Image (cartoon, rainbow, N blue to C red):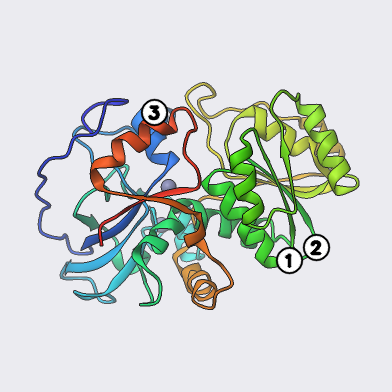
Amino acid sequence: MFENKKPLVIGDYNYPEPDLDEVVVKVGATGICRSDWHYWNGDWEWMGVVPTFPHILGHEMAGIVEQVGPDVRKFKKGDRVVVPFALGCGKCRPCSEGHQNVCENMIPFGFTCMGSFAEYASIPRADTNLALLPDSISFSTAASLGCRYMTSYHGVVDQIRLHPGESFAVFGAGGVGMAAIQIASSLGALPIAVDIDDNKLRMAEDMGAIATLNSSGMDVYEIADRINELTDGGADCTLDALGIASTCVPAILSLRQRGRHLQIGLTTGDQAGMTTLPTDVIVTKEIQFTGSFGMPPHRYRELLGLITSGKLHPEKLVTRKVALEEASSVLESMTSYNTMGTVVIDRF
Ligand SMILES: [Zn+2]
Ligand SMILES: [Zn+2]
């Protein structure tokens, strides 16, 4: 990437020898994500995350360790690994409390360092962040955990603690939303998909949605009324997977008293980090508003175990496997929200 919003260019880049705590990984597969699209658009300047050009995108990676730095103890050449995008330092207060995903000194892999739309990628802080990948899980399945699937898993299981039998309205049936629906369904909860695209709603049903709502042309109160009818008085939990007011506000209005809202979608350039919220409803219904950002690395063990035991199927979200050369056109199609599920660059 040489310029925001301009087609990606494939060229040669020589990685330096791994630093003390780094590993170099041969990329097996890497997801193409809306976060790549945000960065490519120059959306996150208000968060201080600005690319220096040339930059290599890609943060949803799995692959084989090729080379290890002198201080790396837990990994060796030939290990199959999956890489979380939020690389914690292992030393700050959140890290020492087990919340490496919100590290005070985080390195967002693929954003402030070179990413994985490449043959090889260099990963700092390897011992603190990487997880071994069981042989039974393919690189493309591991890449599809991405940021999206694991953020949904952490959000649904750890943050809002969705229970069996609870209703859960998911606003935005893209990668994050679709993952949340599948995870909620596997927990025995009752997910409802809300989107403006019938194709995505059909896929959401395949992932376990018990009902769907095409909200195109509806105002926020009409959407909330429909969710109220479908859940007999309001959803126990909601998710805004998009980060725009037209999904976040109706999600909150759709909650019952003491409902829990999960926010995963980040804002785009138009909002620049701010969204108007229905504050009075949050107060008078005692609603909880919770975020989810990535997943602490120690949670991979449970998540990967649920995949190997067949309880979770992230691979069902992979709608397309493409070559590295196609990454640019996939990003361009995201501008019109024209992609379904998860697209993965598969190198093996
Ligand atoms: Zn830290
Ligand atoms: Zn991502």
> In the image, 205: left or right of 83?
right
Read off the residue under disc 2.
Answer: 165
Q: Is residue 337 above or below residue 219?
A: below
Check disc 3 and report its element: helix, strand or loop: helix
Nearest to N terminus: mark 3 or mark 1: 3
Read off the residue under disc 1.
Answer: 188
Q: Quadrant of the N terminus?
A: top left
- Mark 3 nearby-residue class (10 Å; few <14, some 14–19, many ≥20): few
Residue 45, disc:
3
Check disc 2 and report its element: helix, strand or loop: loop
Q: Is residue 301 above or below residue 338?
A: below
User: Looking at numbered disc 1 in the image, what kind of residue is underneath it?
Assistant: Gly
Figure quadrant of residue 164: bottom right
Q: Quadrant of the C terminus?
A: bottom left
The answer for how far apart the CA atoms under marks 3 and 1 are is 40 Å
- Residue at position x 57%, y 54% from top? 179
Nearest to N terminus: mark 1 or mark 2: 2
Residue 272, disc:
none
- Residue at position x 28%, y 41% from top? 326
Which residue is nearer to you in this view: 227 or 270? 227
